[in-house]
Amino acid sequence: MSISSRTTAGPRDAGRPSALSGPNATASASVAARASTRTLETVRDGRGHVTSQVRRTVLPSGLRIVTEQMAGARSASIGVWVGVGSRDETAATHGASHFLEHVLFKGTSERSALDISIALDAVGGEFNAFTAKEYTCFHARVLGEDLRLAVDVLGDMLTDSLVADHDVDAERDVILDEIAMHDDDPDDVVQNLLADLAWGSGPLGRPIAGTVESIQAMTRDRINRFYKKHYVPENMVVSVAGAVEHADVVRTIKKAFGRNGFLDGQAEPRSPRGAVRRPRVRGGEAHVSRPFEQVNLVLGVEGLPRDDDRRFAMGVLNTALGGGTSSRLFQEVREHRGLAYSVYSFAANYADSGLVGVAVGCLPERLDEVLATVRAELALIATEGITAEELSRGKGQLTGGLVLGLEDSGSRMMRLGKAELVHSEVLGIDEVTARIDAVTLDEVRDVAREVFSRPELLAVVGPE
Amino acid sequence: MSISSRTTAGPRDAGRPSALSGPNATASASVAARASTRTLETVRDGRGHVTSQVRRTVLPSGLRIVTEQMAGARSASIGVWVGVGSRDETAATHGASHFLEHVLFKGTSERSALDISIALDAVGGEFNAFTAKEYTCFHARVLGEDLRLAVDVLGDMLTDSLVADHDVDAERDVILDEIAMHDDDPDDVVQNLLADLAWGSGPLGRPIAGTVESIQAMTRDRINRFYKKHYVPENMVVSVAGAVEHADVVRTIKKAFGRNGFLDGQAEPRSPRGAVRRPRVRGGEAHVSRPFEQVNLVLGVEGLPRDDDRRFAMGVLNTALGGGTSSRLFQEVREHRGLAYSVYSFAANYADSGLVGVAVGCLPERLDEVLATVRAELALIATEGITAEELSRGKGQLTGGLVLGLEDSGSRMMRLGKAELVHSEVLGIDEVTARIDAVTLDEVRDVAREVFSRPELLAVVGPE
């Protein structure tokens, strides 16, 4: 965010519908004293040359390794995915997943925090991490020849972090500042409000970073117990894509993660988080008064859980509703009425629940007209569904965007890691494309009718 | 920005130093009744196969076309760069560049606004634009086979927009909302304040989007005159990268931009904006009181103009100071003292001026300690320069980041278009790398000493 790249964004800022990935089926992994390896997908170009190949190895410890070798790539991206996030926390550990994510950068018995930073900075690599409600991911992007270095640093951090008392205290201050930063971001505030409205104080409803109170009360021991409990091989997936060779990656990972006997045990990879008990979503409305210039609002309803078959129809519906500049909401709210700069719809999925909604930022005096316009569009699409032209356009947009979105090693690493962790299997691009192509007008209308007849959730943040 | 990708950012968020590109020299283009074409750069892999080739054609009308054919790419990115931005505005046209950028999406004699949106949405393409202080860029990313479509839409929009009265009025409301959105973003507010402090009410000091007053007063005629004056072939560069073939691209552009005689004249491409009169930067301090949770501040000094030979030394200096997580500022402000989540330095260049600075967001009670810490680091680096280890690491970081940052068609298109427009020539990656490698400790110390002894600029936004 340097000034030199400072620009005013143009008018094409509508949200892109979330990528569709992952199958319904869950595949159970083999359990054996020896690693098992399978080839999941091979893509060839017109002349029969292999352009990409996805392979998967399960180590006896339960650690899963998924790689995609991409012909011609110079970079390599690696992600370590851990099946733990804010929904695994209790009131007493609220914010622990994210706190831990920070603390793991602070040093191991081999490396100081500065050593960790220097290692990837020195080769121009990108190195970061994020915490979500259902998983935590540590990722790096480097030139292919520097992959071993990145694997070594990540393996060290994830298996042997010290979680030292004084580091916990220093990061506590950093996280309190991060929470203040999110509190100054209207999008963050309104999305947290929506989650709270939908799921209350239950695990899905709480903000990922925790609260000022929960972070102030967090202890080193609580974080360390959380670390030891959740950061185990059977709860982790390593995904690597780009200029990589599978067998070589597996060898490097075994060495980097094998420190201190971390991979010595035997276990089956943990199954994806199931839909044990579907959280109830009641309707409701919440306003938070903040002295912003704009009002930010999200109008939503309960959506679909992740493995629901109808998610492909929902993807097409979401695209037609608010997934691009030709979408109904963009056309009506922005192009025709000039009511808002930013308007888009979204469909979010979790293991056992989901949200579908529309997000708008507008001037306070336009709030009533925005709400009336959005509600009218939702009512219309719930009754009549979409047109044949919108169906065909939505499919083109989703499949074209899928291919365009998977050109770099980073996005392929993300696709592999997330799919393996939350679905236990990586669905090929062809299969996803076929599922999108198979969506019918009736399916879109049925899912629109069902979903948009659910009780309305409305979160609003802005001046009085 | 859908909820499904909603995560809390991890600890590795420091700013990346801006990419270095472009030479000092300016090359004058040939003027002829026939197009002239040159090959600027050819890169081969270890086996001698061409992996990328940069070619440049100048049409008799003065329109420049620069392409980079990338072996193995599936996508193609196109950018149309116009040498006009907010610094070309007067008080009466303040905000016209950005306003025009919006209005060009609203329809031509061939296409409605909806037609324009549908065209690229239907193939899953990305389509956007941005306005900066010195240029405006319209860009798209599509699959290679859809490039002709993208070129055709862009050529139509840029040469034949209607700039209709009612579209100007509808976009006026959208832009007023966009200004409100920026006013809610602490980073935007503090950077605008810094520019104002540095260059006052002069062209470089004004916010790109205009003000509420200037946008309310803007007329259709003023915008249209601005359009006809600045959107001329000799002031435009089209850059295309990815799955493209140069001669084919040139043919397609000639057709798409040749509408209504747009390319019929003869002209020499306009020279890059020169350093006519260097704007004076005095020191100073400005505070804006806003009810945010955080204080956002930028501490800066006047930097280097774009073609200054010392910009490579400045790049290394900026990297060591605040360009990564191993940088001095990140280590001291965040890792050791836990004062802030986000801290980074930046170096911005314009034709005749520049800014170098440090940006921090922190809790209000930590402001004094943050300021003291940042000032101490600046004083130290101004006196002693950097260490040999920092020099070597900084070079690795810049060159590694350069290669990693140019893997996709979008970033290559951006590099080509910007370099051609602001430097009149595209410097090869090898040449940029060589310039970085040649930087010495003395050069870094000298530029640090000179720049950081200039009068201090301090912009602060936050609660009282």
Image (cartoon, coloured by chain):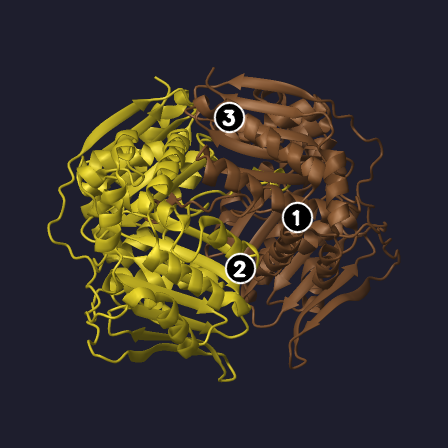
Chain colours: A brown, B yellow
Residue at numbered disc 3: A369
Graded by Cα atoms within 10 Å as few (under 14), some (14 to 19) or many (20 or more), the crowding at tag 2 reads many
Q: Residue at x 82, y 39 (%)?
A: A274
Q: Cα distance, mark 1 to mark 2?
A: 45 Å
Label 2 is placed on what type of residue? Val
Q: Are marks 1 and 3 in contact (CB under 8 Å)?
A: no
Q: Of callouts 1 and 3, which one flags the residue occurring earlier in the amino acid sequence?
A: 3
Image location of residue B287, percent across then percent down: 28, 24
Helix, strand, or loop for circle 3?
A: helix
Label 1 is placed on what type of residue? Thr
Count all numbered tags in the image, as a single digit. 3
Q: Residue at x 50, y 81 (%)?
A: B46
> Quick one: B279 or B163, which is closer to the camera?
B163
Q: Are marks 1 and 2 on the same chain?
A: yes
Instruction: Please tell me whether mark 3 or mark 2 is closer to you in this view.
Output: 3
Label 3 is placed on what type of residue? Glu
Left or right of A7? Residue B222 is left
User: Given the image, what chain letter belongs to the residue carrying mark 3?
Assistant: A
Image location of residue B35, percent across then percent down: 28, 78
Q: Of callouts 3 and 2, which one flags the residue occurring earlier in the amino acid sequence?
A: 2
Residue at numbered disc 1: A387
Residue at numbered disc 2: A142
Image location of residue B295, percent across then percent down: 38, 26
Instruction: Please tell me whether mark 1 or mark 3 is closer to you in this view.
Output: 1
Q: Cα distance, mark 3 to mark 2?
A: 48 Å
